[in-house]
Each structure stands twice: as structure tokens, then as C-alpha cells.
Amino acid sequence: MSTLYKNRIEEFRIALNEPKISLTKLRELCFSGIPFEGGLRSLCWKILLNYLPLEQAQWNSSLKKQREIYAQFLKEMIIQPGIAKANLGIFREDVTLEDHPLNPNPDSRWNTYFKDNEVLLQIDKDVRRLYPDMAFFQRPTDYPCLLIMDPQNEFETLRRRVEQTTLKSQTVAHNRSGVTNVCSPRKTTSANEYEVLPNGCEAHWEVVERILFIYAKLNPGIAYVQGMNEIVGPVYYTFATDPNTEWKEHAEADTFFCFTNLMSEIRDNFIKSLDDSQCGITYKMENVYSTLKEKDMDLYLKLQEQNIKPQFFAFRWLTLLLSQEFLLPDVIRIWDSLFSDVDRFDFLILVCCAMLILIRDQLLVGDFTINMRLLQDYPISDVDLILKKAKELQDSA
């Protein structure tokens, strides 16, 4: 470890040991990348995502309260419905019209249960393939949720619910474009992809599944949309690999609240009815091109001439915060800068422009097919170079 890097770590420790954190100073430090050592990134993200207050004396009480609230969510939305489902299967003579699965009332418990299953199956399908090039999400967590994973529990867990529903129903998939795809029941897949751990253990992807299911239940207006798994994944990974075991143990609850706060800023990207509004994704994609026009007219005209619309590539870049364009460690480094910038999602527009400008020479000589391939499989992996260029564009505004 170089002296320069050690000094940088010390700068972070000094900033984070202040009785009241200077958000301006912390943002300045984080923008250039947060060291992993000592759980610094995990702590900084919790502050930057408005989960932890700036007053350090309030941290313990704030965390205790939030984690208790999350435990209550688990009880209300997974454990209690699971117990009710189990009981309905046992006491058949007590089943009333209200409890009956064929009850036509849209507000009945069973109707809610079936609707939830539809959402759960889509979440399950997406989280199982989260970062397939990494083994992390398939590995068992060191801290399985004891409220749920106790082998003595008789209620229906999400795991059992998915297993049973998959056997009985078709998989209904809603993609971001609003298209509903009805496909046959899941075909046999490789053992590794859907391997289920023994009772009492759970994989990291199962924790992510639970976070997304709770979020969908609490936010029925948006529920779950494909791609949210790509947003929650890097946050959970950062918290679940924290070297500080006291924080690592609560990665699930902490991720839930940080993800919720982050989604409050970007949720409009996932709501199709808002696409053409000033807060929607179409406006942001057009903003990428209007910014490019200002920074590099020749490149802008070339893309226009070839009729390469921002929807062809910038939709994914912006909606998923570049999480599918780079390897996870590089995504996390980009997010250090995004989270620490005051106008974080304006900076994302500049990062997208920087990505275009850095391959301008190839784009200017390429035909439509070559250029589409470049934009959909971005060739530069040096994210520090991209962020440096984005900062230059920001400073020249």
C-alpha cells in the first residue's frame, strides 16, 4: 500500500470521525473513489444515500430503529402471510368464502396472494441470474435471516412459495416496456443456476429477492420492474462484504433502506406512464444528445445522420446507472462518484457523454451496424478515464 493511498485512507477516517460530518468535505473525498479498507465505502454510501444522519452520535439509535422497522416488515409481509397460508391448508372446515382461493373479490387475501406470487416469480427469475460471472450471489450468506430460516418454522417462506407456484403456474414476465410475456413453466436448467441450499442456509440472491419483494409490497404503485435487481445488487454486495462484521450482519436491512432512498430519486425511470414527462427517461435520454451536441457537434451530427437514437443504448445506461456496462468493481467505482455529486444524476448524463466522446474516432468512421455494436457492448473498461472525462465536461460547462 503506497504512502499516498495510506494518506487518503487517513483523510477519510478524519472526515468520518467528526462529531458532525461535513457533507461537502465527504462528497469531495468520495468523488475520486472510496477505499474499501475498514468498511469506508459501506459507511460513506450510507451517509451519501441519506440513511445515516450527519451527527455521529445519532448513528446507533437511528440504525437500531431502522433495523427494527425492517424486522417488522418481514413479520407482516412474509411471516404472517406464510402462517396464514399454512393454517388455511390445515383447517379446511374453517375456510369461509372470504378465505376461499376462488373468491372473486379483488380485495380478498387470496387475490392479493396470487398477485404477489406473480411479482415474486419475476423477482426470483431476475435475482437468480444477478452477476452470473461472479460466484458471490450463489454463495451462502454468513448471516441468514433467523426470523425466517429457522428449520422449525412451519410457515411458507418465499423459497417454498416460489417452488410451489412454479410447479403450479405459468411464469408471467413484465418487462420495462410494459409487454407481458407468458411462457411455459420453467424448464429444467443447469443445477448450478437454481441450486437451493439446505434448510437453515440461504444464498445472497435469496436475500436480494426478499429485499425486492418487501419493496414491491410497500410500493404497489411501481411494485417490481425488471432492472431493479441490477440497482440493488451493487448496494447489497458493498454492504455484505463490509469487513466490519457488526455492519455486515445487518446488510439486508441497511440495503433495503439505501435502495429505497436511491429508488426515490430514480423511480421515475421505471414508470412507463412518465416516460415523456420532464422527469421521465425519454427526457433524460434526449438530454444526453443535447449535451453531446453542445460538447461535440461533429459526433452528434454523425449519430443523427445514421439515425442512431439514444433509446438504442442510453435507455439501459441511464435506467440501470451503467450497472450492465462494466464489471461490478467498476460499477461500484462509478457509483462512488455518482452518489457523491450534488447533482448526481446530472453527472450521469455527463458520464454517458464522456463514454461517447472517448470512442468518437471509431464512431465517426463506423457504419450503423459497427456503431450500434460499439454502443451496446462498450469497448473501454477504464472507468477512471471515463470519470475524468466526465469531470472535464462538467468543469467546462
Image (spheres, helix red, strand yellow):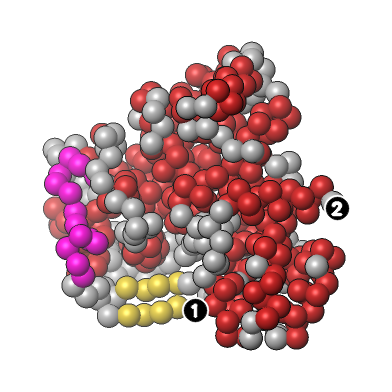
Residue under the image location 38 percent in, 57 percent down: 131
What residue is at 36 percent from the left and 25 percent from the top?
Answer: 245
Range of residues picked out in magenta: 189-202
Q: Which residue is mark 1?
A: 179
Kindly state the secondary structure of the residue where label 2 is placed.
Answer: loop
The relative height of residue 300 versus residue 76 in the rendered view (above or below) is below
Q: Position of residue 130 (x, y in %)?
A: 38, 57
Q: Nearer the viewer, residue 19 or 218?
A: 19
> Is residue 14 at least partly visible in the picture?
yes
Q: Which is nearer the eye, 126 or 68?
A: 126
**Disc 2 target residue:** 397
Which amino acid is tagged 2? Ala
Q: Residues within 10 Å of mark 1 (few under 14, many from 20)?
A: few
| Residue 150 on image: x %, y % | 19, 37
The question of residue 62 being in magenta is answered with: no
Tell me if residue 168 comes above or below residue 220 in the rendering: below
Q: Residue at x 47, y 65 (%)?
A: 226
Residue 373, numbered circle: none
Across and down, in percent, residue 267 comes to 60, 56
Give the side of residue 317 with respect to residue 155, left or right: right
